[in-house]
Image (tube, rainbow, N blue to C red):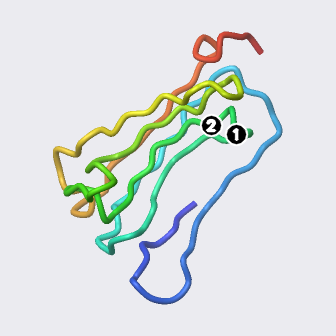
Amino acid sequence: MKVSAYSGSGAIFSSEMVTNDIFKYASVRTVLKSSPVGGVVEGNFFYLNDNQEIDWEILTSTTLQPSAEVPAGIWATNQALVPGQPSTHTTVPFTFDPSQDYHEYRIDVSDAYFGKSA
């Protein structure tokens, strides 16, 4: 799938793959050149429900410089597997400008991560 960068006006395009299959292992990769337009959210994620989500997100207005509320970098989040428990998250600072070239962002998952076997 290929989605072109947002130009700053007009429609905003996205891409999604959906399956009900159960996988024991997965590797989801996104190759993207981040948009130079501020305020765009870009990402790569697994989502089943509010307690089974893993994602990497880039907010282009805070890619390299933080705002008062949002640190600079790419956000990595694992939602809590148990309702009411805290999620785990961190922000990883970029050592490069992600809008200057294409980069691969990847999430690898195994049954060991979820503590169960398929």
- Horizontal side of 21 relative to 66 (left or right) equals right
Secondary structure category for the residue under label 2: strand
Give the residue pinned by disc 1: 50
The residue that appears at 51% across and 47% down in the rendered structure is: 44
80, above or below 41, in the image? above
Q: Amino acid at mark 1?
A: Asp
Towards the viewer: 48 or 28: 48
- Circles 1 and 2, Cβ within 8 Å, touching? The answer is yes
Check disc 2 and report the residue beneath it: 53
The percent coordinates of residue 85 (x first, y second) are 62, 24
Placement of 92 over or under 69, stated as above or below: above
Q: Is residue 21 left or right of residue 110?
A: right
User: Could you tell me which secondary element the residue under label 1 belongs to?
Assistant: loop
Q: Position of residue 95 (x, y in %)?
A: 16, 44
Q: Residue furthest left?
A: 95
Q: Residue at x 83, y 39 (%)?
A: 20
Q: Nearer the viewer, residue 2 or 80?
A: 80
Q: Position of residue 55 (x, y in %)?
A: 52, 41
Looking at the rendered image, the quarter that the C terminus falls into is: top right
User: Residue shown at 74%/40% (left/top)?
Assistant: 49
- State the residue lying farthest toward the right: 20
Specify the quadrant that holds the N terminus.
Answer: bottom right
Q: Is residue 116 above or below residue 89?
A: above
- Give 101 or 73, whichever is nearer the viewer: 73
Q: Residue at x 44, y 49 (%)?
A: 57
The one of 67 and 100 positioned closer to us in this rendering: 67
Of labels 1 and 2, the one closer to you: 1
Q: Around disc 2, counting alpha carbons within 10 Å, would you say few (fewer than 14), some (14 to 19), or many (20 or more)?
A: some
Residue 73 position within the rendered picture, expressed as x and y whole percent measured from the top left: 28, 48
**Mark 1 → mark 2, Cα distance in angstroms:** 7 Å
In the image, taking residue 56 as reference, residue 117 lies left or right, namely right
Q: Give the left or right position of residue 63, taking residue 13 as reference.
A: left
